[in-house]
Image: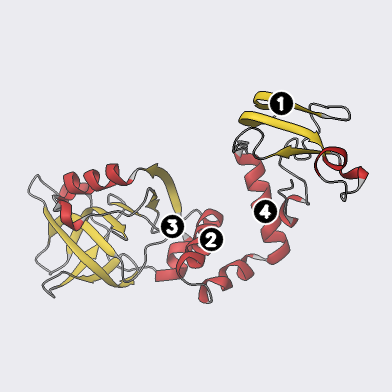
Amino acid sequence: MVLSSQYNNWQNIIVNGGFNSPSVGSGYSFFNGGIPNWSAAKAEVGVCHSIYNSNWPASSGQCIELDSDNNQRYTQTLNVNSITITQWIINKIAQEGKAGIESQLSCAEDQAQNKVDCAVSKLEGDVECKVHILKDTFDNYICQLYGAAQSHVQAVKDLILYKYDFKSSAYINHYGSASDADFGCECFDDNYETGECQIDEIHGHNIHCHDHNGHQHVLQVAPCSHFEGQFPIPKKGKKIHWKGKRQPCGKTYVRWATTCDC
């Protein structure tokens, strides 16, 4: 078994991918709990050619049996440090060029778009941090933070929640920058307004959206805003929950905002 890429010089990051450890000689053996680097309830390892299929070449080495005395699941956990990941990203940029990576944004959609967005976000620091969150925990979090009705928050699966850096080059490349003066946390008191909208457009720090009554809103974010979402980069057409303070100019200064597909 091999897991490699041109970006890591085709080096296999799977350990014991040939199942050659431990050696079973010319036969086969059972190993409770698995074999080196692979966990399983009861692993069965044998010589491929002589035990499992004589049509395979004798040089094929050792194999694992997926159903030993019952169906088995073999698992290996890979721990990759940040230095290695950074090197892979550098290799990707060196081979494709940063512009080449970003040009993929215009031709990918839906899930593929998410993957490309994520790659660009990591390259340019668009995501300040991210956390894995269970769907029920996410539903409760949204309901408590924004006072949303439970029926309005129904995540279909566990998700990753990203915190956005709207001053990063990746965000600016998508949505531009804004000339609006930033507001500070002193603008807020304990009397917050909350809302739930669908994003129509994003222009710099301003998010244009409409609520279920058709009312239009302009949400402005600033460095003191906590802006997060289910997607590596916020997306038009998706739901946004917000909490902030409406201003005399008609905009709403946002203290917290979460985008999701729920």
Residue 90 numbered tag: 4
Closer to the chain start, of discs 1 and 4, is 1
Mark pair 2, 4: CA separation: 12 Å
- Nearest-to-viewer mark from 4 and 3: 3
User: Mark 1 against mark 3, which lies toward the viewer?
Assistant: 1
Residue displayed at 12% across by 63% down: 247
Q: Earlier in the sequence, mark 4 or mark 3?
A: 4
Q: In percent of the image, x 33 and y 54: which residue is there? A: 156
Q: Tell me, yes or no, whether the two marked residues, 3 and 2, touch with CB atoms within 8 Å.
A: yes
Q: CA distance from mark 1 to mark 4?
A: 43 Å
Looking at the rendered structure, the secondary structure element under dot 4 is helix
Q: Which residue is mark 3?
A: 232
Quarter holding the N terminus is top right
Q: Amino acid at mark 1?
A: Phe
Which of pointers 1 and 2 lies earlier in the amino acid sequence?
1
> Quick check: marks 1 and 4 in contact, CB under 8 Å?
no
Residue on which the image places disc 1:
30
Q: Residue furthest top?
A: 32
Distance from disc 4 to disc 3, alpha carbons, whole Å, reads 20 Å
20 to 53, vertically: above or below: above
Q: Quadrant of residue 239?
A: bottom left
Left or right: where 192 falls relative to 260: left
Q: Distance from label 3 to label 2 (Cα)?
A: 9 Å
Quarter of the rendering occupied by the C terminus? bottom left
Q: Estimate the spatial distance between the alpha carbons at disc 1 and disc 3, rounded to whole Å.
A: 44 Å
Structural crowding at the residue carrying mark 1, measured as other residues with C-alpha within 10 Å and reported as few (<14), some (14–19) or many (≥20): some
Residue assigned mark 2: 120
